[in-house]
Amino acid sequence: MAAVDDRPAPPRRWGAARRDLDPPALVVAADHRARGVLTMERYADYVGALRAALPECDGILASTQPLRDLADAGAVQDRHRTYLSLNRSGLAGMASELDDRLVTTVAQAARDGWTGVKHMTRFDLGDPLTSPALELLGRVLEEAEQAGLEAMVEAAPWRDGRMDHDVAAIVHAAVVAHDIGAPLLKVPMPDAPAGPARADAVARVVASVGVPVLFLGGPRSGTDDDLHHLVTDAMAGGAAGMAVGRAIYEAPDPASTARMVANLVHGRAPRG
């Protein structure tokens, strides 16, 4: 009689099998609410907007519940890359915002079957909490490598309680995270005039590291035309793609906005 294999079956892998990021890519960022950024209060509206946008995107990064609900609803396809957001204890506006601890783990991401994890590290040279944040980053990178999962690191320069968009500060954060071992970076767009100057600032960040760099879309503060120019400049500067959240899911038509960004990221002519 053949021996019975009683080993547990591997988890369902929600999304694409692990591989190096094939740039360019559009990843929809959906972990803001877990950090207390409640720009969309109604959960059904939030998930509905993400479901509308996802067909146009290459992946999603999200906190535990939205990611599970989107997968269970069939919105996550095999082609999608899926990143579980790990540290959300640094709530927006909190006195100890830089004390950003894990609210879930690499092991949980592996059990749930996601293809990767996303970890945010803030760099504030005036705050001693930056040191334990870097120690935590190193541990997360080691665990992700051991688990065979991708690790997207949001290297966020921080000053006066908010994200710093100065290009030198972004380079500094990107270099430190990269040299610690981050295989994929997510950084803010540099604060520079739209057009060649902003593309040159993006190019400076990209050239400072040896891994793909995604650039943030930021809050929805303007029109789709503003987002169009931002993405155009990022790609002209050599970005590996975009990680866009609120600018897509708060749009009047999330699917249309996501399609516009995806077309720019992938260099496709707009569909009629």
Image (cartoon, rainbow, N blue to C red):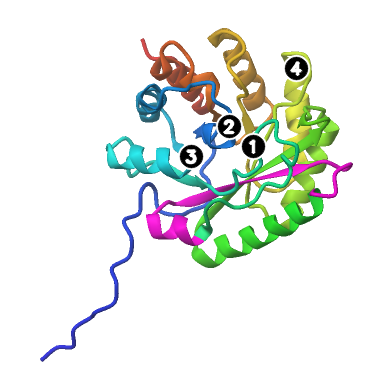
Q: Dot 1 corresponds to which residue? A: 91
**Range drawn in magenta:** 107-129
Give the answer, above or below, for where 207 lies relative to 105.
above
Q: Position of residue 76 (x, y in %)?
A: 34, 39
Find out whether the residues at labels 2 and 1 contact each other: C-beta distance under 8 Å.
Answer: yes
How many C-alpha atoms fall within 10 Å of the one at disc 2: few (<14), some, or many (≥20)? some
Q: Quadrant of the N terminus?
A: bottom left
Q: Is residue 117 left or right of residue 137?
A: left
The image shows residue 119, relative to residue 235, as above or below, that is below
Rendered image: mark on residue 196? 4
The disc placed on residue 252 is none
State the separation of the CA atoms marked 3 and 2.
14 Å
Residue depicted at 49% across the width and 17% down the height: 250
Label annotation for residue 36:
2
Q: Amino acid at mark 2?
A: Gly
- Give the Cα separation between the discs numbered 1 and 4: 35 Å
Question: Which quarter of the rendering shows the C terminus?
Answer: top left
Q: Is residue 15 above or below residue 214?
A: below
| 3 and 4 marks in contact (CB < 8 Å) | no
* First of labels 3, 2 by sequence position: 2
What is the spatial separation of the Cα atoms under label 3 and label 4, in whole angstroms?
32 Å
124 inside magenta stretch: yes
Res 62 label: 3
Q: Amino acid at mark 3?
A: Ala
Q: Position of residue 141 (x, y in %)?
A: 63, 59
